[in-house]
Amino acid sequence: MGHVELLKRLQRDLVVNPLDMDQVRENGIDLSIGDQLTIEPKAFALAKTREWVEFPTDLVGLCNLRSTYARKGLLIPPTVVDAGFKGKLVIEIVNLSNQPYTFKQGERFLHLIVAKCQGAKPYSGKYQHQT
């Protein structure tokens, strides 16, 4: 979904809160880390987004680590945001480098791509409404 359509859906039924308009990019939304987090070399950690998201039942999301971090040896597994999901996103980050990396609170680390999805069963799993 492109910039113009994202803006329409953000005004209608896609929730990202808090949201600065410069987080809405050409083809997705940048999300930030909720709390400062250090990941040691060859280790992984769970990072929670600052933003609360609410997906309507006709949209899904795919999360990618911003390329700046991949170039530093950080990776995330494929992460899907299901139709109907409500909550903060918790993302597994692996540090493959030989150096620790510290994310500062509020640092934009994730790119959320939003796509239309017809006929989806709304998410109702154990992570619904996670904070």
Image (cartoon, rainbow, N blue to C red):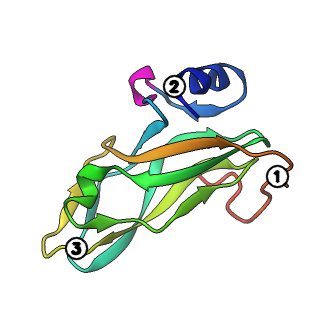
In space, the residues marked 3 and 1 are separated at their CA atoms by 36 Å
Q: Which residues are magenta?
A: 20-24
Tag 2: amino acid: His
How many numbered circles does the render carry? Answer: 3
Picture coordinates of residue 77 (x, y %)?
Answer: 46, 68
* Tag in front: 3 or 1: 1
Please tell me whether mark 3 sits on a helix, a strand or a loop: loop
Please tell me whether mark 1 sits on a helix, a strand or a loop: loop
Residue 21: within the magenta?
Answer: yes
Tag 1: amino acid: Pro
Tag 3: amino acid: Glu
Q: Can you identify the residue that label 1 sits on? A: 122
> Residue at the location (13% across, 76% down)?
98
- Left/right placement of residue 41 relative to residue 46 reads left
In space, the residues marked 2 and 3 are separated at their CA atoms by 35 Å
Q: Can you identify the residue that label 3 sits on? A: 40
Picture coordinates of residue 41 (x, y %)?
Answer: 20, 76
> Residue at the location (69% across, 51% down)?
129
Mark 1 and mark 2 lie on one chain; the one further toward the N terminus is 2
> Residue at the location (82% across, 52% down)?
122
Picture coordinates of residue 126 (x, y %)?
Answer: 72, 65
* Tag in front: 2 or 3: 2
Give the camera-side residue of 58 and 126: 58
* Tag in front: 1 or 2: 2
| Residue farthest bottom in this picture | 42
Residue 3, labelled with which disc?
Answer: 2
Q: What kind of secondary structure does the magenta stretch mostly adopt?
A: helix
